[in-house]
Image (cartoon, rainbow, N blue to C red):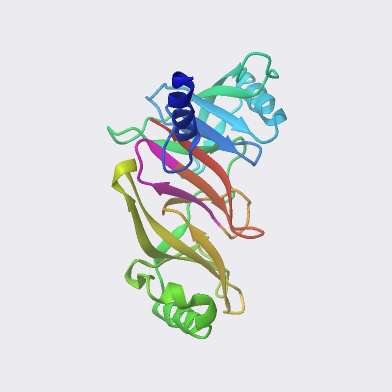
C-alpha cells in the first residue's frame, strides 16, 4: 500500500503536459503525415504517434519504400527509417513507430529538431518581420475598441516584440498573421518558464480577428495547410523539450507536440 501511494503521484507527474516533459522523446500529431524528429547527425529515435493509427503504418511504409520526407522549417529533403512498436502488452500493432531521419547535417553543435512532412511544403519559408507601424496602429485601435473583451490584453501586450508573418511576395492586402508577446509565466520548482503569445489575423479587407493565445514563443512558422496561414511551432522552457504545433486554419488549436529529455 505504501509503495502504491508513492507511485501514484509520480505517474501523474510523468503524464503531465506541457509543464513536465516525459523521459521518452515523443512526437504526437492529430494530422496525418506530420511528425517531429531530431536533425542529423543525431540518431536518437523519436516515438511518433498519431490520432489515427493508420497513419503510423503510412509513415512506416513511406520510409520503407525509400521516399523522401521534408523538414517544413526550410523545405530540405531527408530520408527516414521507421520501426513499429506496441505501446504495451496486448496493444494493437502499429500504435507507435520509432523514427529517425538522414540527410543534411544541422549547422549547430546543439541538438536540433524539425517538423517533417511526407509531402514538400507549398511555402518552405515565411516572411517574418516587425509589425508594420500602420498595422500596429490598426490593431491597437481594434483592441481598445472592445475593452470588455480585450481589457486584460491591454495590460500585458508587448508591442515592441510584435511580428507579422506572410507568404513571401504576397500581394497587397493578403492575409497577415500577427503574433504579439504577452505575460511571462514562471514555476521555478517545475523548471518551467514561458512567455504567452497572442495571435491575430489581418484579413484581406484590413479587419483584425483575434485567434487566441499560444502557451509559449513561436520558434518557427511552417506550412501545414498549403494556404496563407502558417502553422506555429511553439516552445516553452521546461526540464526537457516542451514543443507544440498550432494550426490557424479553422481557428487556433493545438494539433501536435514534441517532448522528452
Q: Is residue 223 above or below residue 61?
A: below
Q: Magenta stretch?
A: 230-242
Q: Is residue 197 visible?
A: yes
Which of the 4 quarters of the picture holds residue 205? bottom right
Towards the viewer: 146 or 98: 146
Q: Is 254 left, or right, of 105 in this rendering?
A: right
Outermost residue on the top side: it is: 89
Residue 2 image offset from top left, x and y in percent: 44, 21
Residue 219 image offset from top left, x and y in percent: 41, 50
Outermost residue on the front side: it is: 1
Question: Image point 29% across, 34% down: which residue?
Answer: 110
Q: Dominant secondary structure of the magenta stretch?
A: strand
Report how many numbered discs are placed on residues in the image. Answer: 0
Residue 191 image offset from top left, x and y in percent: 31, 42
Q: Is residue 124 above or below residue 203?
A: above
Which of the 4 quarters of the picture holds residue 248? bottom right
Towards the viewer: 10 or 117: 10
The quadrant in which the C terminus is found is: top left
Which of the 4 quarters of the picture holds residue 251? bottom right
Question: Image point 68% across, 27% down: which residue?
Answer: 58
Q: Is 63 left, or right, of 12 in this rendering?
A: right
Residue 170 within the magenta-colored segment of the rendering? no
Q: Is residue 102 visible?
A: no
Towards the viewer: 124 or 215: 215
Q: Is residue 229 above or below residue 175?
A: above
Residue 162 image offset from top left, x and y in percent: 39, 68
Amino acid at each position: 500500500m505504501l509503495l502504491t501511494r508513492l507511485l501514484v503521484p509520480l505517474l501523474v507527474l510523468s503524464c503531465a503536459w506541457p509543464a513536465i516533459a516525459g523521459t521518452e522523446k515523443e512526437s504526437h500529431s492529430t494530422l496525418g503525415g506530420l511528425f517531429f524528429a531530431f536533425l542529423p547527425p543525431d540518431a536518437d529515435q523519436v516515438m511518433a504517434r498519431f490520432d489515427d493509427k493508420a497513419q503510423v503504418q503510412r509513415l512506416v511504409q513511406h520510409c520503407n519504400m525509400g521516399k523522401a520526407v521534408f523538414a517544413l522549417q526550410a523545405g530540405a529533403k531527408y530520408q527516414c527509417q521507421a520501426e513499429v512498436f506496441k505501446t504495451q502488452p496486448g496493444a494493437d500493432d502499429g500504435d507507435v513507430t520509432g523514427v529517425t531521419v538522414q540527410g543534411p547535417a544541422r549547422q549547430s553543435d546543439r541538438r536540433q529538431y524539425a517538423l517533417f512532412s511526407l509531402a514538400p511544403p507549398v511555402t518552405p519559408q515565411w516572411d517574418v518581420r516587425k509589425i508594420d507601424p500602420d498595422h500596429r496602429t490598426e490593431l491597437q485601435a481594434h483592441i481598445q475598441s472592445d475593452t470588455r473583451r480585450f481589457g486584460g490584453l491591454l495590460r500585458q501586450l508587448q508591442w515592441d516584440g510584435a511580428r507579422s508573418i506572410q507568404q513571401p511576395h504576397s500581394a497587397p492586402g493578403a492575409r497577415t498573421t500577427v503574433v504579439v508577446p504577452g505575460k511571462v509565466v514562471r514555476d521555478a520548482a517545475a523548471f518551467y518558464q514561458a512567455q504567452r503569445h497572442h495571435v491575430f489575423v489581418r484579413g484581406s479587407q484590413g479587419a483584425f480577428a483575434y485567434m487566441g493565445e499560444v502557451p509559449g514563443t513561436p520558434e518557427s512558422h511552417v506550412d501545414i495547410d498549403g494556404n496563407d496561414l502558417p502553422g506555429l511551432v511553439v516552445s516553452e522552457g521546461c526540464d526537457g523539450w516542451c514543443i507544440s504545433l498550432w494550426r490557424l486554419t479553422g481557428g487556433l488549436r493545438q494539433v501536435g507536440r514534441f517532448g522528452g529529455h
